[in-house]
Image (cartoon, rainbow, N blue to C red):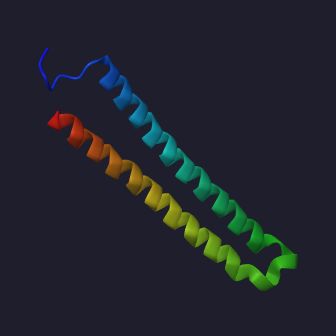
Amino acid sequence: MAENEMILRDHLAMDRTKLANYRTMLAFVRTSLYLVVSGLAVMNVEVLEGIRFLGWILIGSSLITFISGIWNYFHFRSKMKTLYMQD
């Protein structure tokens, strides 16, 4: 067996890492959706008319959260591919 050849344990660790990266991306998307729903709720409730700007802030932070989650996913995916190809 060559020294740089991956064994079963290494393949399983790589699969766990891929799944953890995917799960983290889904958590970012879920948080982003919660922020959008919260922002829309704040904007549409008449009692909260005075803090309508908060709804826009929540929707804007939702967009930032979504973009950072997608960027994080692809960044670590490419980093894992680079590390896998080195070995």
Near-viewer residue (49 or 18) = 18
Name, please, the residue furthest toward the bottom: 50
Q: Residue at x 50, y 59 (%)?
A: 66
Q: Residue at x 27, y 46 (%)?
A: 79
Q: Quadrant of the N terminus?
A: top left
Q: Where, by quadrant of the figure, is residue 15 drawn?
A: top left
Q: Position of residue 50 (x, y in %)?
A: 79, 85
Q: Residue at x 50, y 46 (%)?
A: 24
Q: Where, by quadrant of the figure, is residue 41 drawn?
A: bottom right
Near-viewer residue (54 or 24) = 24
Name, please, the residue furthest toward the right: 47
Q: Position of residue 58 (x, y in %)?
A: 64, 70
Q: Where, by quadrant of the figure, is residue 7 drawn?
A: top left
Q: Residue at x 69, y 74 (%)?
A: 55
Q: Determine whether, in the image, residue 71 is placed left or right of residue 54.
A: left
Name, please, the residue furthest toward the front: 3
**For residue 70, above or below residue 15:** below
Q: How many marks?
A: 0
**For residue 23, above or below residue 65:** above
Q: Position of residue 87 (x, y in %)?
A: 17, 33
Name, please, the residue furthest toward the left: 2
Q: Determine whether, in the image, residue 34 is placed left or right of residue 9.
A: right
